[in-house]
Each structure stands twice: as structure tokens, then as C-alpha cells.
Image (spheres, rainbow, N blue to C red):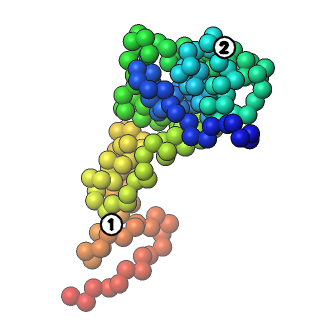
């Protein structure tokens, strides 16, 4: 990487979409992180036709030549991403809410495309801190809902509850293989 490449990227300010929107929509379009940043830098500099392709590449942390920057600016993925961003910028569409971003990430995670699913998991993990472990049933169920949706969370919760038996005041896992549990005998 050359000395003139910027290392701390500045995402476009409002009324442009948020960083989460750029990363999510870019991932849905199959763009690399560098191309997403490149498109965002182009948006800040006036769009793909602004003749600032090389500067946008430097701002995005890419050390590429003029010709490659020109090709990136005219690529289908970058053009689609810029087109969607410009619609939000102009007020034609509203920015995504947190719920919509979470829903789209969940859809990508469940997709058959392994690359898209891995990217969505990475984006989700980057957006929020890891879940804290809790023994509270309400917290556990809320976490299941946020990860898998309401229906799947209910099925998982029901299965978890069915797999535990109350034995001597302790909850122990039920063995379905026919073996006996090594639960201590009560002497009451």
C-alpha cells in the first residue's frame, strides 16, 4: 500500500445512507468491502460521473491505477449501489430502519449462498456486541427470536423444555437413548 492511501475511511454524511446501509446493500450485491467503500467515496465526491475515480479509490484505501479505478466506477455492482444510494439521498426512498436491516441480515444468513451468509454473519457481529449469556428464560427467548425469528424460536424453546426433566428438584437432560441418568438418590 502506498503512502498516499487513506487508512481511516469517512462514510458519507446524511442525507446519504448510513454505514450499515452501505455495507448491507453492498454485501447483497456481492461487492467486496473495498468496492463498497469506493462507491461511498464516489458518492461523497459527486457520483460515478464526477471524474474523481482515482481520489475515491485512495479514500477507500485502494492502491490502484487510474484505469482500474475508472473500470470500478463503471462496474455494474458499483453503479447499482450508487443508484440505490442516490435514491435515498434524493428522498425518493427512505433509509432502512434497524428492524429492516436486521430482517435483511437474517434473510442473507438463511440464504443458500454460503458466501452471502458468511458476509451477513460478519456484518451482524460487527453491528452489535456479542450477546451476553443469561440464565433468565425471558432473555434467552428474546435472543432466540432475534437470531432465528418468532416461529423458529418457539420450536427451539419447546424442544429445549421437552429435553429437560425435573428430578429431585434439579433439571437434568433427558436421555433418549435408554441409558439411566446418574442422578443422586434422595434420602428424604
Q: In which quarter of the image is residue 28?
A: top right
Point out residue 22 in the picture as x, y percentages from the top left corner. Answer: 51, 28
Q: Is residue 38 visible?
A: yes
Residue that appears at 45% across and 42% down: 127
Residue that appears at 63% across and 10% down: 49
Position of residue 82 in the picture relative to residue 15 (left or right): right
Point out residue 139 in the picture as x, y percentages from the top left corner. Answer: 30, 53
Q: Callout 2 environment at 10 Å: few (<14), some (14 to 19), or many (20+)?
A: some
Q: Is residue 112 visible?
A: no
Q: Is mark 1 on a helix, strand or loop?
A: strand
Q: Is mark 2 on a helix, strand or loop?
A: loop
Position of residue 180 in the picture relative to residue 32 (left or right): left
Would you place residue 135 above or below residue 67 in this image? Answer: below
State the residue position of label 1.
165
Would you place residue 23 above or below residue 94 in this image? Answer: below
How many numbered discs sit on the rendered protein? 2
Q: Which of marks 2 and 1 is nearer the N terminus?
A: 2
Would you place residue 8 above or below residue 107 in this image? Answer: below
State the residue position of label 2.
51
Which residue of the protein is positioned furthest toward the front in this rendering? 4
Residue that appears at 71% across and 41% down: 3
Quick check: marks 2 and 1 in contact, CB under 8 Å? no
Point out residue 165 in the picture as x, y percentages from the top left corner. Answer: 33, 66
Structural distance between the alpha carbons of marks 2 and 1: 69 Å
Residue that appears at 31% across and 62% down: 135
Q: Nearer the viewer, residue 46 or 111?
A: 46
Amino acid at each position: 500500500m502506498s503512502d498516499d492511501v487513506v487508512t481511516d475511511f469517512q462514510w458519507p454524511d446524511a442525507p446519504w445512507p448510513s454505514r450499515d446501509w452501505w455495507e448491507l446493500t453492498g454485501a447483497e450485491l456481492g461487492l467486496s468491502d473495498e468496492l463498497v467503500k469506493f462507491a461511498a467515496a464516489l458518492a461523497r465526491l459527486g457520483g460515478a460521473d464526477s471524474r474523481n475515480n482515482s481520489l475515491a479509490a485512495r479514500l477507500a484505501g485502494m492502491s490502484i491505477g487510474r484505469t482500474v479505478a475508472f473500470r470500478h466506477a463503471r462496474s455494474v455492482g458499483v453503479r447499482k449501489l450508487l443508484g440505490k444510494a442516490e435514491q435515498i439521498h434524493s428522498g425518493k426512498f427512505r433509509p432502512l430502519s434497524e428492524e429492516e436491516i436486521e430482517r435483511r441480515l437474517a434473510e442473507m444468513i438463511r440464504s443458500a449462498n454460503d458466501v452471502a451468509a458468511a458476509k451477513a454473519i460478519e456484518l451482524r457481529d460487527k453491528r452489535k456486541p456479542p450477546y451476553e449469556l443469561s440464565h433468565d428464560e425471558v432473555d434467552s427467548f428474546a435472543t432466540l427470536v432475534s437470531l432465528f425469528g418468532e416461529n423458529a424460536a418457539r420450536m427451539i424453546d419447546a424442544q429445549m423444555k421437552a429435553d429437560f426433566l425435573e428430578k429431585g428438584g434439579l433439571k437434568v437432560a433427558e436421555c433418549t437413548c435408554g441409558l439411566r441418568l446418574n442422578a443422586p438418590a434422595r434420602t428424604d
